[in-house]
Image (cartoon, rainbow, N blue to C red):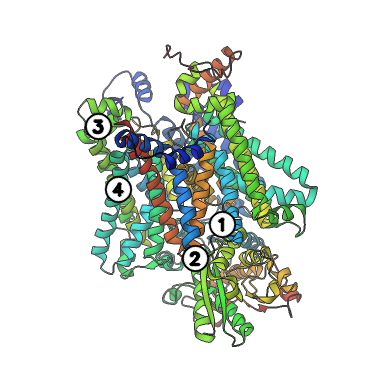
């Protein structure tokens, strides 16, 4: 809905002279609550470009995109589950690894088409089990997706034997993984394409509308005659398909796959969604914001590594960042209300 | 799959207390049959294991009961290839293994150790998730008269007296060996290297990292470590971290790369290749000689790695506990038979195709 | 909603069946009890050692359950605390880096209280969703633990004291189990007998109503999070003492296991319904299940699959869930024609 707004608003802000300070500041605060993430991202990127050696190099831009792509694809998809008011999908950890292992193990034997089909089947099963349990049984999403993580990883380890799988070094997958358009790796193009498609789905389709209204008020939506169970299955399906594509991208990038490769994707993706400003209350949020959150977190991690700062500090920074993002949002919202 | 059944049964809502049990029993029955089929015949004995006799079974007993407390298994490539030779050796020696996987959670392994001690097996094989935390487990096993054999990663020296022996490698030594190769490659020249570590906080990661850094500092101060970051044992994380470190320190200052395992060194090499660098110009060392690393050595991209044999590791863990149970070794590691060091040959392009260093994982 | 949870088991002589029905209808622990009963039965039939070596089983339950008890205090108020596992790790490291044991324990427990206070500050004062705020704390404290431990395990200066702590105290009962029981009793009494604790239910059920009724909601939120932080730190202290070293990445399995225990125990994540007893039952079911599976010697991935399936069945076979399925099916059938109306205001909130 508000895809183009931020840019015009930034311009408006920059040009508007300081008139009517009081009203202005209130409007500014409200605007900030909505669009703080845009400003933060811009400030971070600008200051990194100025102060951090090598940040603005083409190679480093590629690295940032490599960082952002797989986790970002998971995050934009998981935004649907979050917006629908169901916290998160923990099973993305198992889903990404499953898709990656299937992509390499199956394509080595039966070709890419079979691999994609098999991975889609797996994604569908995840979506249906998660979606039915949460949508129809109204079971708690955290525990449902926790249990599907256990079952999924267990099955993956049982069936794949836990081995590490390699793709052929010059196979199509490996070439895609190493491919770039200028400094932008193909995986980042996939992320952008996914963001645009999912933004369209969320903002312009009946399904997207229902997901958002469901997050705002479940009962009202249900009484309005919507089959909420199907909507939840749909939200989980979007997440599962995104996790699958993230698995493909990850497999292509490293040209290897192993069941432990996506550890931590659950909360990392959630962190990006939150930094982007999507509310875990459900309802509010957008895919574009999630993309920004992912970029922000990726740039920050990149900068900290460039400054040779230890992993512990990187985790602390991520924690502080989440707290800051939501605090600014909450304070601005409150100031706006007064 | 449970939905159909539940839809039907949901009509009897009032007997809700029976519904959950019924579904659960059905599922457990299903899964248990599945397990039984999945497991090789070896594990069936757990129900009728004779836990009535307190003392360890004499040689008269047909099968020996052994608990193997491991921190990894089918969730890691190494553990995956460690398990089958272990099981095969156990079958050969008439040992029934009960295997656990604590996923490197020290608290979970401690609890598994309590379970193992309570089960009064003939012996315990322990691969410490965290060497600093296992003394209580050793004392408990000792008090119960159960011999403990350590595998893969040794305990701290002060705890060695509580064990019957150790088989495996020396993580610190592996890092040191990799550093020695780096020193040889540098041959006195002033060079800069970047270091990719395992998962932060993981003890193997810490030991290998220290082994590398301290050996470099002691033996060839002409090599300086310009930056280090974790690669989390993954190729993708390692590739990004390596590329970013190259940017951070300036690629023109870097002549070498060390990673704590072959999977991560593959990521580092990929990072160099993505920049269009000629990898052969760089001094690159690592640890593992795996299916991923060995071909890199043969191609001349990876200058040296340290072979670690998962099959040797798994097999000798069982050999060791068998020695302990049969009295070939005793508490305190006083016998020659009580330590089995895994040969950790350095693998370079000269010997990479030798059959004795054929990659295993 | 508030009162129904304080009914105690036992006592009174109504018609037995009627009384059982009434109790079951009112209490939230139904599925936890059912699950525990099945697991106990299966364990009894296949691995009697689970019972003969009861101190081991109790130890496992205490390991999973202690953090879950504190977490329940927060869940009752409709809040979440994702930072429990990181709190456990960070407080353990705090304990280990301080040479003096007593001082270390005090500092570690204070760390827990401080974390609880910071969590509550974000939630009650700034007004941020606890799920998000404590996710920030999850990352932050994990970073703190890594930084102050220098990214490696820290050995306790006085390892002998740690080993002594792990020894049985009364019969085969170790201090861990004893502390677990004491914490259980304390929190149970607090939320069922103490006015302040009973107000947790009101806060969780309807914060606005609770506020209107004169309950200091913010202060209760502080109390709840500080209980959770303290108990997590206590678990970190116990773990560190028993293992004689602190692991900066400890607790990887704790967070989700404690959530699972609380939810299987019938605690409603949106607050207002649930009980500490339920959490105990949930932790008991999970603990016995884990010990049984370990003893069974079944392949680890198969154990994972099994635990996952049991969890999934446990959260979908609650009577409420089955009712939800039925109503979903019914409404789907009756409204198939008008599925997904895009028009605005789908509010016809007349029926209940």
Q: Which residue is mark 3?
A: C199
Identify the element where label 3 is drawn: helix
Q: Looking at this view, is C210 or A193 the one in front?
A: A193
Q: Vertical placement of C267 versus A273: above or below?
A: above
Q: Vertical placement of C338 versus B208: above or below?
A: above
Q: Which residue is mark 2?
A: B128
Q: Position of residue C336 (x, y in %)?
A: 60, 15
Eye-nearest disc, 1 or 3: 3
Eye-nearest disc, 4 or 2: 4
Identify the element where label 1 is drawn: strand
Q: Are marks 4 and 2 in contact (CB under 8 Å)?
A: no
Instruction: Give me the C-alpha separation between circle 4 and circle 2.
Output: 36 Å
Q: Which residue is mark 1?
A: B98
Q: Position of residue A257 (x, y in %)?
A: 66, 54
Q: Which residue is mark 4?
A: C118
Q: Is residue C86 left or right of residue C42?
A: left
Label 3: chain letter: C
Q: Earlier in the sequence, mark 3 or mark 4?
A: 4
Label 1: chain letter: B
Q: Is residue C76 visible?
A: no
Q: Earlier in the sequence, mark 2 or mark 1?
A: 1
């Amino acid at each position: 809905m508000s895809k183009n707004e931020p840019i015009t608003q930034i311009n408006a802000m920059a040009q508007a002279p300081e008139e009517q300070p009081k009203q202005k500041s209130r409007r500014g605060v409200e605007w900030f609550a909505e669009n703080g993430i845009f400003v933060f991202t811009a400030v971070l990127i600008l200051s990194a470009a100025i102060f951090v050696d090598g940040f603005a190099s083409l190679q480093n831009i590629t690295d940032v995109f490599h960082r952002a792509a797989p986790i970002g694809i998971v995050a934009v998809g998981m935004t649907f589950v979050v917006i629908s008011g169901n916290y998160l999908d923990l099973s993305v950890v198992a889903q990404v690894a499953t898709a990656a292992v299937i992509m390499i193990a199956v394509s080595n034997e039966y070709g890419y088409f079979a691999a994609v089909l098999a991975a889609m089947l797996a994604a569908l099963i995840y979506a249906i089990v998660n979606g039915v349990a949460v949508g129809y049984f109204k079971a708690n999403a955290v525990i449902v997706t926790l249990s599907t993580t256990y079952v999924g990883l267990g099955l993956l380890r049982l069936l794949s034997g836990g081995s590490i799988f390699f793709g052929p070094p010059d196979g199509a997958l490996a070439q895609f993984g190493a491919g770039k358009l200028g400094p932008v790796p193909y995986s980042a193009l996939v992320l952008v394409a996914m963001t645009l498609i999912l933004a369209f789905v969320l903002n312009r389709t009946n399904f997207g509308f229902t997901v958002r209204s469901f997050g705002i008020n479940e009962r009202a939506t249900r009484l309005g005659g919507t089959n909420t169970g199907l909507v939840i299955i749909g939200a989980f399906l979007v997440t599962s398909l995104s996790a699958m594509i993230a698995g493909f991208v990850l497999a292509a990038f490293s040209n290897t796959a192993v069941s432990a490769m996506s550890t931590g994707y659950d909360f990392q993706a959630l962190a990006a969604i939150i930094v982007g400003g999507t509310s875990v209350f459900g309802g509010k949020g957008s895919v574009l914001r999630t993309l920004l959150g992912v970029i922000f977190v990726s740039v920050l991690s990149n900068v900290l590594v460039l400054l040779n700062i230890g992993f512990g500090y990187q985790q602390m920074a991520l924690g502080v960042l989440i707290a800051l993002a939501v605090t600014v949002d909450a304070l601005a919202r409150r100031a706006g209300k007064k | 799959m449970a939905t159909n059944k539940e839809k039907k049964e949901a009509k009897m809502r009032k007997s809700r207390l029976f519904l959950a049990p019924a579904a659960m029993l059905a599922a457990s029955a299903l899964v248990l049959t599945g397990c039984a089929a999945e497991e090789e015949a070896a594990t069936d004995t757990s129900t009728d294991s004779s836990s009535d006799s307190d003392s360890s079974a004499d040689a008269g007993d047909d099968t020996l009961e052994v608990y193997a407390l491991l921190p990894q298994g089918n969730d890691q490539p190494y553990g995956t290839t460690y398990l089958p030779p272990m099981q095969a050796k156990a079958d050969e020696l008439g040992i029934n293994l009960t295997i656990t996987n604590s996923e490197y959670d020290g608290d979970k392994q401690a609890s598994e150790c309590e379970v193992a001690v309570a089960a009064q097996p003939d012996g315990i094989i322990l691969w410490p998730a965290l060497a600093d935390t296992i003394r209580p487990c050793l004392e408990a096993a000792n008090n119960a008269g159960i011999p403990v054999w350590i595998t893969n990663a040794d305990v701290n020296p002060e705890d060695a007296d509580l064990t019957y022996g150790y088989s495996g490698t020396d993580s610190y030594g592996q890092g040191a060996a990799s550093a020695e190769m780096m020193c040889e490659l540098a041959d006195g020249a002033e060079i800069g290297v970047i270091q990719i570590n395992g998962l932060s906080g993981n003890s193997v990661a810490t030991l290998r990292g220290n082994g590398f850094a301290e050996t470099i500092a002691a033996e060839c101060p002409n090599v300086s470590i310009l930056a280090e970051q974790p690669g989390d044992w993954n190729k993708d994380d390692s590739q990004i971290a390596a590329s970013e470190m190259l940017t951070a320190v300036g690629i023109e200052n870097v002549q070498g790369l060390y990673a704590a395992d072959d999977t991560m060194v593959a990521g580092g090499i990929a990072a160099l290749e993505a920049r269009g660098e000629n990898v052969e110009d760089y001094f690159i060392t690592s640890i593992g000689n795996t299916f991923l690393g060995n071909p890199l050595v043969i191609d001349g991209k990876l200058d040296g790695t340290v072979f670690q044999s998962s099959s040797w590791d798994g097999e000798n863990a069982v050999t060791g506990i068998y020695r302990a149970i049969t009295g070939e070794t005793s508490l305190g590691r006083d016998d020659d038979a009580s330590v089995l060091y895994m040969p950790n040959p350095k693998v370079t392009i000269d010997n990479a195709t030798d059959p004795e260093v054929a990659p295993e994982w | 909603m508030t009162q129904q949870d304080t009914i105690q088991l036992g006592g009174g002589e109504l018609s037995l069946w009627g009384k059982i029905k009434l109790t079951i209808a009112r209490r939230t622990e139904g599925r936890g009890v059912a699950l525990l009963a099945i697991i106990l039965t299966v364990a009894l039939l296949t691995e009697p050692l689970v019972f003969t070596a009861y101190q081991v089983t109790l130890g496992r339950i205490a390991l999973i359950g202690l953090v879950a008890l504190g977490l329940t205090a927060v869940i009752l108020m409709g809040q979440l605390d994702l930072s429990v596992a990181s709190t456990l790790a960070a407080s353990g490291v705090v304990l280990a880096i301080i040479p003096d044991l007593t001082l270390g324990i005090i500092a570690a427990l204070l760390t827990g209280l401080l974390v609880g206070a910071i969590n509550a500050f974000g939630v009650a004062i700034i007004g941020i969703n606890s799920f998000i705020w404590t996710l920030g704390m999850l990352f932050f404290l994990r970073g703190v633990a890594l930084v102050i431990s220098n990214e490696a395990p820290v050995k306790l200066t006085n390892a002998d004291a740690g080993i002594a702590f792990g020894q049985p105290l009364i019969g085969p009962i170790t201090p861990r189990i004893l502390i677990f029981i004491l914490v259980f009793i304390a929190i149970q009494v607090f939320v069922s007998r103490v006015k302040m604790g009973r107000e947790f239910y009101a806060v969780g059920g309807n914060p606005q109503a609770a506020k209107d009724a004169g309950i200091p909601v913010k202060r209760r939120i502080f109390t709840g999070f500080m209980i959770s932080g303290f108990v997590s730190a206590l678990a970190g202290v116990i773990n560190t003492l028993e293992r004689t070293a602190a692991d900066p990445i400890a607790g990887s399995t704790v967070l989700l296991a404690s959530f699972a225990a609380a939810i299987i125990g019938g605690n409603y994540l949106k607050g207002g319904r649930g009980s500490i007893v339920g959490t105990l039952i949930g932790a008991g079911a999970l603990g016995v299940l884990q010990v049984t599976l370990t003893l069974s010697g079944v392949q680890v991935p198969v154990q994972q699959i099994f635990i996952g399936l049991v969890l999934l069945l446990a959260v979908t076979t609650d009577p409420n869930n089955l009712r939800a399925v039925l109503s979903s099916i019914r409404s789907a059938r009756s409204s198939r024609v008008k599925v997904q109306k895009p028009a605005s205001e789908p509010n016809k909130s007349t029926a209940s």
